[in-house]
Image (spheres, rainbow, N blue to C red):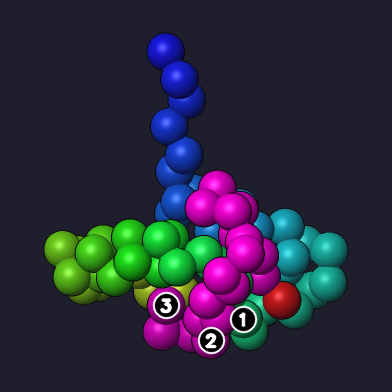
Amino acid sequence: MRPVFDLISEIYENIAAYLFVTGCVPGTLVVSPRSYQRLLELECSEPSGLVFLRTLSVVIDEVLPDTEVRVG
């Protein structure tokens, strides 16, 4: 069985790692166009579930793989 990529877990892990290393909360989330579309779908289905979308600026990177998330 192939592992499934969990976008939300990846985002939270990246935020936690950034916070641990820098001591600051990130201000930017960089995702692929497809991941951004998935985030919008999730936000519509659970409007209160994705709190980080209200605090981070989202940047869509056309060349970023769908299984990669960056924060900064």
Q: Where's residue 36, x and y in %?
A: 41, 68
Q: Is residue 42 visible?
A: yes
> What residue is disc 2 on?
57
Q: Where's residue 29, x and y in %?
A: 58, 74
Q: Nearer the viewer, residue 17 or 62?
A: 62
Neighbor class of circle 2 (other Cα within 10 Å; few <14, some 14-19, many 20+) is some
Do the residues bearing badges 2 and 1 touch, measured as CB atoms within 8 Å?
yes
Which numbered tag is attached to residue 6? none
Q: Magenta span has 57?
A: yes
Rendered position, 27 above or below 3:
below
Which quadrant would the N terminus be assigned to in this image?
A: top left
Q: Could you say whether the residue bearing mark 2 is in a helix, strand or loop?
A: strand
- Between the C-alphas of marks 2 and 3, the distance is 8 Å
Which residue is at a point 55% across and 80% down the rendered structure image? 59
Which quadrant would the C terminus be assigned to in this image?
A: bottom right
Magenta residues span 53-71
Which residue is at a point 41% across and 61% down the rendered structure image? 34
Tell me the kind of residue under disc 3: Leu
Q: Where's residue 10, x and y in %?
A: 55, 51
Neighbor class of circle 1 (other Cα within 10 Å; few <14, some 14-19, many 20+) is some
Q: Is residue 71 left or right of residue 20?
A: left
Which numbered tag is attached to residue 28? 1
Which numbered tag is attached to residue 53? 3
- Between the C-alphas of marks 1 and 3, the distance is 10 Å
**Lower sequence index among marks 2 and 1:** 1
Which residue is at a point 83% across and 64% down the rendered structure image? 21
